[in-house]
Image (cartoon, rainbow, N blue to C red):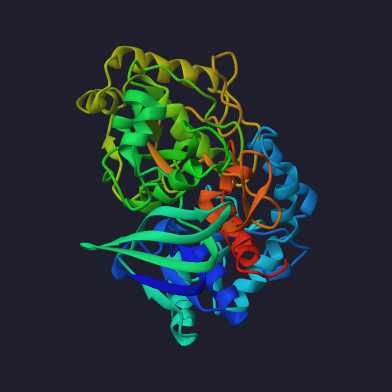
Amino acid sequence: MDHDYDFIVVGGGNAGLVAALTALEKGKRVLLLEKAPQEDRGGNSKYTRDFRVAHRNGQFGLDGEYSYDEFMEDLIKVTKGQTDKRLARMVVENSGQAVKWANEHGVKWQRSLPSTLHLGRTNLFILGGGKALLNVYYEKLKNKHCTVMYGSEVNAVELEGNEFRSVIVNQGNEKLKFRASELVLSSGGFESNLELLKKFWGVRADNMIIRGTHNNTGLPMISMIENGAETIGKGNDGHAVAVDARSPKFNGGIVTRVDSIPFSITVNREGERFYDEGEDLWPKRYAIWGKLIAGQPGQVAYSIFDRKVWGKFIPPFKPPITDPTLEGIINKLVEFGLRNPERALETVKSFNTACRENTRADHARLDGTAASGIIPPKSNWALPIDEPPFYAFVLKPGLTFTYMSLRVDERARVVKRDGTPFSNIYAAGEIMAGNILTNGYLGGLGLVIGTIFGIIAGGDQI
């Protein structure tokens, strides 16, 4: 079956919806192809909740000021400079425009909650979270008579010469072909493609939890690579956080994330600490912990803390393991794979000695309350673990999206391996986020990247 449109969007998350709405407002006939059924639409966007935005004092109802330069410095720091600075600067300087665009299209906002997130100055939270944003945008598409096809898996992008001509779509038992003048790919990464994931991560992939959608298998990206598109970013890297080991394999979302790490000590199954838990504010460091845990034996770790810090962070979807004694909580972790409880207990006691004089921590800032003389040190929020009851979470690496992406230019055009862009193929969202995030992550950045490049891919200037 052949069908003709002006504009095809592959992927119905935030970036694709923004691109589709932008194109519709320019009078184009738009087809949106969403792999998921309607009740599961939206990719990873349904698990999101906030936009990181540069602003002047009091703008957008946020606290203080967050300048372009500070935002850019934060981004360069978390990526260790591994970012396309031209595209990164575009995102930073237009972050306010992304918020305004969402505002104009019906998104509502709420203030952030006090917690380890430390985002009251930098991030604007969506009222109702990512699902509310999706529902608003889908209703806009309906009102503008956009054709939306659910359950439509794009498995091939067809070119004529170097120009896009059509996509091949599996829909149930049917194979369909859709033609258009322009194509936007917003179908995410390949984190749910376990076969491909294992190619890059090896046996570590078996113990990973995919906290996002099971629908992101990367088939459109793979087809573009076969068509000569250039990639950026490593296949064995991605936005990966520490999640509760009791999480489902797929689709757990943001509630599976464990935020206790900055106020705890975290040991591997041999009972050893392996990284500074208090290195920096949580929004700048939480996305390194998935990869850190993936590098530990068995891809498992344990966050151990006491009564002093319980309630200082947003809890995940299941309660922690608890016991009235330190020895008891350590022994309970043996049931969850801890191999050396004696060494774990010694690690806790050594940590307590290193921070024995510390009596108070300021959880709202980098407080310098350190545990020194131990390796690794703990730079902030180091309080002895000595007040019952004692708590622990068992952690696994939770992969959100992969960093290997399609390279794009400043017009969101997909770039070929010869360095020139395809004239009518664009990308927005996680499928191209690796241009900016080849390492690390800043909380709230994903929606901003998707919105800005969705607007550009849809044919508007930013």
Q: Residue placed at 34% from the left, 15% from the top?
A: 270
Above or below — where is 432 with respect to 367? Answer: below
Q: Residue placed at 54% from the left, 14% from the top?
A: 375
Q: Is residue 295 left or right of residue 317?
A: right
The answer to whether one can see residue 362 in this image is no
Q: In what quadrant of the picture does the N terminus appear?
A: bottom left
In the rendered image, the residue lying farthest to the front is 161
The answer to whether one can see residue 152 in this image is yes
Residue 202: name its quadrant. Answer: top left
Q: Nearer the viewer, residue 197 or 300?
A: 197
Q: In what quadrant of the picture does the C terminus appear?
A: bottom right
Q: Residue placed at 36% from the left, 49% from the top?
A: 316
Q: Position of residue 47 (x, y in %)?
A: 42, 58
Q: Is residue 81 left or right of residue 249?
A: right
Q: Nearer the viewer, residue 327 or 296?
A: 296
Q: Nearer the viewer, residue 76 or 330?
A: 76
Q: Residue placed at 32% from the left, 65% from the top?
A: 176
Q: Position of residue 417 (x, y in %)?
A: 61, 39
The number of callouts visible is 0
Above or below — where is 106 with respect to 239? Answer: below
